[in-house]
Image (tube, coloured by chain):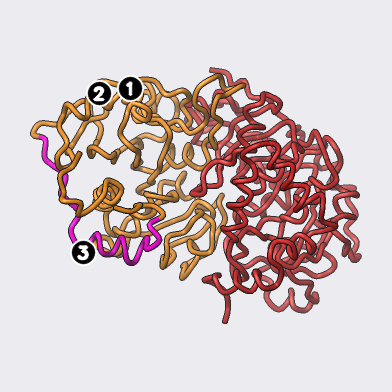
Chain colours: A orange, B red
Amino acid sequence: MPQNNNRYNLMELMVTVAARQLEDGKTAVIGTGMPLAAAMLAQKTKAPNLITLFEAGSVAPQLVKLPLSVADSFTQTGALMHQSMNEIMEACQRGVVDYTFLGGAQIDGYGNLNSTFIGGTWRKPKVRLPGSGGANDLASLCWRTLVIIPHDLKHFVSKVDFVTTPGYLTGPGAREAAGLPPGTGPYRVISTLALMGFDPESKRMRVEALHPGVTRENVIAQTGFEMVFADPLPVSEEPADEELAILRNEIDPQRLIVGRN
Amino acid sequence: MVPVGELFSSPDVDAARAFFGARPRTLTSKLMTVAEAVDRFIHDGDYLASGGFGGVRIATAALHEIVRRRRTHLGFAGHTATHDFQIMAAGRCFDRCDAAYIVGLELRGLSACARRYMESGEVRVTEWSNATLGWRFKAAAMGVPFLPARSLLGTGTFEKSAAKRIQCPFTGVPLAAVPALFPDVGIIHVHRADVYGNAQVDGISVADWDLARASKHLILTTERIVSTDEIRAEPAKTLVPYWLVDAVCHVPYGSFPGNMPYEYFSDEAHLAEWMEAGKTQATLDRFLDKYIHGTRDFAAYVELAGGEKRMAALREMEPLRRR
């Protein structure tokens, strides 16, 4: 576990690392929870003109408080435009949207995501989950997909129970063969242990940076598939005091997402 | 890979044209109670689509009335369905479901009662995504039997959908053909409507413009009844013209406990009460007896859930409210 003198918790670390992956002047469709906290932090730090879109229809709002839903009033404050879900999804399909930022219940080594069911069968699942929501569309159609997910054997699995949302499917060329738009796919995975990308040749998930205090062995022990490691392997930059202050005081004062230390 | 999902409704556009062609378009008042609207337009076995976004601008009163009248064997479009899904699952009103987003309430977690129902094996499910289910309404609204989409492909979601893989006749790119969905009845909650059904919405429209045109029958619940002149004063805000509408029901706080943008925020405490009650069948039964079967109508439910005092507090919490 990270040695940080209790200055921040793992949720805060994940959100901070995630926020730094988003670029200014780009478009992003954002899901609720940690992805949204990360997008808001990016806007309040290095990416003030990150254009946020919400799948329910809000375009470029001025976010004042963390929304509970991708449709609620807090996604619509100060928006440039109020549209429909189809119009947002059509913008993704047209190639206008640079990033999407998702969560999930399971992820495999090619970045395929499951949010449909865990255990049992599809017809009689042990745990029925929401299904795709917008995730399948967003990960198919936006240029780059980011995923934020806890790092343990429950979440990082060798085979997902169901491929709800496409990563690189079965490997190099599989997205293109399936008919998904070329040039799209998973880009970053931010977990409680590390920042990951994907090897450009093999399309396998690859650790790009370890979080402070985390070892390769920690990652291997908590991953259900064979993880690739970049060389050299840097350490994720810790959250700065300023980032933590914005996160705690402005974005999530009720600690709905980042929890308490 | 040929998808195995069941198609719960026909994308036959000529049958739809025949239906829409014969629909009355006369300018008459459609004002009625929610009970009357559900009685007349929602029957056992019908396919239902619910507008808004799960817990935002939903037609709660119509959903409650469907439970109160114990409608069963409905088909249900689980499009961005959260609290609306929870209500329908609590009443066990549907037995087949097109699932894009179901069971969860976003950040609030999974609904135990919705999970229990979906894990029972009693409900036939076909998987979709928010875009492809939305485009199914759009295809119906356009009067075409399908639309091509570039998502779904290559996934389990596609395999358990009723989409078909086709090739573009012009460019050769593979596409997922998603079939038009004509619900028997749609229910939408709006900010204001006249008695004929000309209706306006403030804020995002989600899928409602497509859903309104796709639906064979449309029930509107509305915060306010206004004059037609008021509609004509700001026509860009009109979501639905009157000839699509069968029933107009005046229901103040009609999206409660959901959020109504520009009016009131969601009641998180009451939604938490729903989540808690759903944990066992016994507590759910008591909860439904208290709030739905034990109340005469939606106004009585609002009164029981805190009345004007609570509604005033929710108005205070709404960030888009015009002060």
Name the secondary structure under disc 1. loop
The residue singled out by tag 1 in the image is A171
Alpha-carbon span between mark 3 and mark 1: 40 Å
- How far from the left and from the top, in percent, is residue B159? 55, 23
Residue A29: tell me if it is visible.
yes
> Within the image, what quadrant is residue B245 found in?
bottom right
Give the residue displayed 27% in from the left and 27% down from the top: A222
Alpha-carbon span between mark 2 and mark 1: 7 Å
Please, which chain is the residue tagged with disc 3 on?
Answer: A
Q: Is residue A131 magenta?
A: no
Callout 2 touching callout 1 (CB < 8 Å) = yes
Position of A58 relative to A124 (above/below): below
Left or right of B190 in this view: A49: left
Residue farthest to the bottom, as pictured? B323
Q: What amino acid type is highlighted by mark number 2?
A: Ser
The residue singled out by tag 2 in the image is A202
Residue A203: tell me if it is visible.
no
Alpha-carbon span between mark 3 and mark 2: 38 Å
First in sequence: mark 3 or mark 1? 1
Please, which chain is the residue tagged with disc 2 on?
Answer: A
Label 2 crowd (10 A; few <14 / some 14-19 / many >=20): few
Left or right of A151 in this view: A254: right
The residue singled out by tag 3 in the image is A242
First in sequence: mark 2 or mark 1? 1
Q: What amino acid type is highlighted by mark number 1?
A: Gly
Q: What amino acid type is highlighted by mark number 3?
A: Glu
Looking at the rendering, the stretch of residues picked out in magenta corresponds to A233-255
- How far from the left and from the top, in percent, is residue A78? 46, 70
Pair 3/1: label in front: 3
Residues at marks 2 and 1 on the same chain? yes
